Amino acid sequence: ELKVEQNPLFLSMQEGKNYTIYCNYSTTSDRLYWYRQDPGKSLESLFVLLSNGAVKQEGRLMASLDTKARLSTLHITAAVHDLSATYFCAVGGGGATNKLIFGTGTLLAVQP
Amino acid sequence: NAGVTQTPKFQVLKTGQSMTLQCAQDMNHEYMSWYRQDPGMGLRLIHYSVGAGITDQGEVPNGYNVSRSTTEDFPLRLLSAAPSQTSVYFCASSYSSGTSYEQYFGPGTRLTVT
């Protein structure tokens, strides 16, 4: 059974600082997703990582994937208040379906 | 191109009532799915479909039914609502093959069962 663990669950950080959110998963998968969710809103896709060593960057966010370690990271560089949100990783269930198994999310609060 | 749409946005039900949450997409995606989101638990897959006429169960299917008669629509039926089904429900769609595995989520339906 595929399990996805995300940590930390809550992250309070100051503007300008760097930090990393970790996503571990228990079985082999060929795709890893990162989403952002603002309060009361739907999920916004940030990154889709499809291969070992994949790295994608968008603004202050950079995501990477290590399929051998079954680990993905979301690195935040020089945080700003606008990045405050809940971030989810999700792992593709594999096979011919696009089932996703989600982590429990990381609530990021960036303090001025 | 409206993407993934869901109706209603909000719903309050009494225990034992039934209802259908609607989901539609206009991107000709083969794959559609329903998730529920509860506080502190992330999203959990309820049911999914890989094409018209084909559905299967996800992690938490009990108390829910689905059918897929067209590519565009994937309704979720609550047979006899229970307070444990109070949640936010999201529908998602994507292509089921090819190079793009991007999944698109609808705006959600907030359901309260009293």
Image (cartoon, coloured by chain):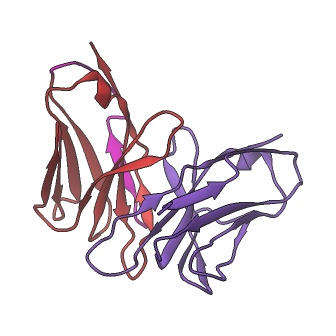
Chain colours: A red, B purple
Q: Residue at x 29, y 72 (%)?
A: B100
Q: Quadrant of the C terminus of chain A?
A: top left
Give the quarter of the image for residue A53.
bottom left
Give the quarter of the image for residue B25.
bottom right
Q: In this view, does A41 lie to the left or right of A105?
A: right
What segment is highlighted magenta in the picture? A1-16
Q: In this orientation, does residue B19 appear?
A: yes
Look at the picture and state if A112 lies above or below A63.
above
Of A20 and A39, the residue lying toward us: A39
Q: Is residue A45 left or right of residue B11?
A: left
Of A51 and A23, the residue lying toward us: A51
Look at the picture and state if B45 lies above or below B71.
above
Q: In this view, does A53 lie to the left or right of A45?
A: left
Q: Does the magenta stretch include residue B61?
A: no
Residue most toward the front?
B1
Q: Which residue is drawn at 61% across and 62% down?
A: B60
Look at the picture and state if A5 lies above or below B39.
below
Q: Which residue is drawn at 57% across and 58% down?
A: B5
Of A15 and B58, the residue lying toward us: A15
